[in-house]
Every structure is written in C-alpha cells, then in structure tokens.
C-alpha cells in the first residue's frame, strides 16, 4: 500500500497586504526574451530580487521574506526509521533571501520555468511537538526547536497558466515542485522527554549523527512544504504584475 507523507501548511496572510495590481520595483531588472543571454539574465535578476526581498517591497505589498512566518508546518512520518509526525508551530524561516541562483530558464511556449539554487543556511525556528519513534527509539516532547539545513541545493519546476485581467495577461502558477538536497542538517529540540536531559541528549545525538537517513525518510514532506511556500510566494508576486511587465519583448509569446 502506498504511503505518502502528510503535509499541512498555512502561509501567513500577514506577510502580504492585499494590493490589486503592482509593478516590479525599479531595482529589479527585467530580461528581454530576445536576449541570447536570457537565461544568464534571468538567473542574475531572480537572485538580485530574492536578495532584495530581505527588505519589505511596498510596490508588491510584500513584507520581509526573512524571516518568513509559517504558522504551521507538519512533516509526516516516513516509511523507514522516522515513525513520528513532526508538528511545527509559529515557525520563522530564516535564510531564504541569501539564496544563490545557479541556473534559471523559461519555456514560454509551454509556460514552464526551471531554476536551481543553493541556500547556505536555512533555519526553521519555532515550536515543535512530536510523539513516536525514530530508529526504533521512543521520542516525545514539545517546546522550542531549531532545525538548520546547510548548503541546500534546490531544483524548482514551475508550471504557469495564463489569465486575463484588465486586458493584460498574467500568470497563475498551477504547481511548483521542488527537490531538496542539504549538505548537512542539525536538529535541536528543547524539552524532549519533559526535560529529562540524559534521554534528550541521547536522542538528539542519534538524530544529528544520522541526519541524512532521517531526512531522506521524510524528505518528501519537506519538499512538499517548501513547494507550497514557494508556490504561495510566486503566485502573490505574479498575480499582481502582468507578464509583459516582468519580461521584455514577451508580447508575441503570451
Ligand atoms: C540554531 O542551530 C544552529 C546549529 O546548531 C546554530 O548555529 C544556531 O546558532 C542556532 N540558532 C538559534 C537561534 O538557536
Ligand atoms: C536537480 O536536477 C539535476 C538534473 O536532473 C540532478 O542532477 C540534481 O541531482 C538535482 N538536484 C536536486 C537538488 O534535486
Ligand atoms: C502542473 O500543471 C500543468 C498545467 O499547468 C500540468 O500539465 C501538469 O501535469 C501539472 N503537474 C503536476 C505535477 O501537477
């Protein structure tokens, strides 16, 4: 029987104020689809934009993306060593705006975007609760936590559907899938076993020493969650700015 990690996530509506339509700030460069170096241009401009999102972007009604508030995030059980649901609440996600874009491309005919990126340090900080087993060892607790992913390579695949608003073509992303490969990960869960320190340190050591096995088992859940986060962000921006105001010379293609 197939088993899929359960994923739940609600993005903070508070990150964005509602504005009907917007413009890319002048500080974000636009690429011409006729430029033979379009992919290079896109890579650079997307990376610059992500770095700028560290500050608020009133033109797009965006508050800072660093940290990004995530009210709830649920990483489901795996099929291997992780027999516990990791339930996170009131999470702040740090580090997204330090991402480096390694490549980017756009297929305007099929409306598919691809990008690869690397984020030096992604930190999920908030409250956790869990009860179950990891590598056959019982684990339970709730309290503050800090889960950090280092040098995470991310592949992004994004599908767009066009829609019309006030005579202009906009894109709505129908799906946004990511794959995640961190180089290393550290887990810190405070107050495990109601503060029973010897047991807590023991299980934290097991988690940190076996981070790769643990992560691989529940990677699906992380990928779905990050996909939802990026999907939400991308749609908030593209729902406000017409395609022809994002790319230059694109009129014949959309
Ligand atoms: C989170 O954990 C990482 C790795 O252990 C550490 O470098 C960082 O200082 C911690 N941050 C906080 C706020 O606890
Ligand atoms: C991204 O895709 C490439 C090509 O398919 C693959 O070699 C690489 O391992 C993938 N990276 C991640 C982070 O999934
Ligand atoms: C993503 O959306 C496109 C249409 O916009 C569809 O063709 C494709 O099957 C979807 N892929 C997934 C994984 O849902």
Image (spheres, grey):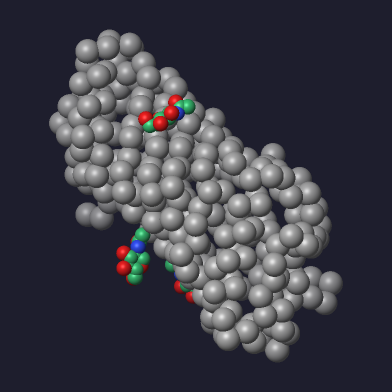
Q: In the rendered image of this protein, does residue 79 appear above or below residue 47?
A: above
The reply, left or right, for residue 217 in relation to residue 96 is left
At x 62% / y 59%, what residue is drawn? 48
Q: In the rendered image of this protein, does residue 230 appear above or below residue 252?
A: above
Q: Residue 65 is drawn in which quadrant?
A: top right
Residue 51 visible to the viewer:
yes
Q: In the rendered image of this protein, does residue 81 appear above or below residue 180?
A: above
Q: Nearer the viewer, residue 105 or 47?
A: 47
At x 58% / y 66%, what residue is drawn? 44
Q: In the rendered image of this protein, does residue 228 appear above or below residue 31?
A: above
Q: Residue 60 is drawn in which quadrant?
A: bottom right
- Whole-percent x, y for residue 118 in the image: 43, 55
Q: Residue 135 is drawn in which quadrant?
A: top left
Residue 156 visible to the viewer:
no
Q: Residue furthest right?
A: 166
At x 33% / y 11%, what residue is drawn? 195
Q: Quadrant of the N terminus?
A: bottom left
- Whole-percent x, y for residue 11 in the image: 59, 43
At x 48% / y 31%, what residue is drawn? 125
The reply, left or right, for residue 40 in relation to residue 140 is right
Q: Residue furthest bottom?
A: 252
The reply, left or right, for residue 194 in relation to residue 202 is right
Picture quarter with ligand 1 = top left
Q: Nearer the viewer, residue 58 or 168?
A: 58
Q: Nearer the viewer, residue 97 or 129?
A: 97
Q: Quadrant of the C terminus?
A: bottom right
């Amino acid at each position: 029987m197939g088993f899929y990690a359960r994923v739940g996530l609600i993005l903070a509506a508070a990150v964005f104020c509602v504005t009907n339509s917007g413009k890319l700030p002048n500080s974000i460069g636009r690429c011409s689809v006729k430029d033979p170096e379009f992919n290079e241009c896109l890579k650079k401009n997307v990376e610059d934009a992500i770095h700028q999102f560290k500050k608020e972007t009133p033109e797009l009604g965006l508050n800072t993306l660093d940290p990004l508030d995530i009210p709830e995030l649920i990483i489901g059980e795996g099929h291997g060593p992780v027999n516990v649901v990791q339930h996170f609440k009131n999470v702040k996600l740090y580090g997204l705006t330090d991402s480096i874009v390694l490549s980017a491309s756009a297929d305007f005919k099929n409306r598919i975007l691809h990008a690869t990126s690397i984020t030096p340090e992604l930190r999920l900080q908030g409250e956790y609760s869990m009860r179950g087993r990891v590598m056959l060892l019982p684990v339970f607790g709730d309290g503050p936590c800090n889960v950090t992913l280092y040098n995470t390579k991310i592949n992004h695949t994004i599908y767009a559907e066009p829609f019309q608003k006030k005579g202009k073509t906009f894109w709505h992303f129908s799906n946004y899938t990511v794959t995640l490969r961190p180089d290393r990960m550290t887990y810190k869960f405070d107050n495990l076993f109601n503060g029973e320190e010897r047991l807590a340190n023991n299980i934290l050591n097991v988690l940190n020493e076996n981070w790769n096995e643990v992560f691989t088992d529940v990677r699906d859940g992380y990928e779905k969650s990050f996909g939802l986060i990026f999907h939400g962000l991308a749609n908030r921006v593209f729902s406000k700015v017409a395609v022809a105001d994002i790319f230059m010379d694109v009129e014949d293609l959309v």
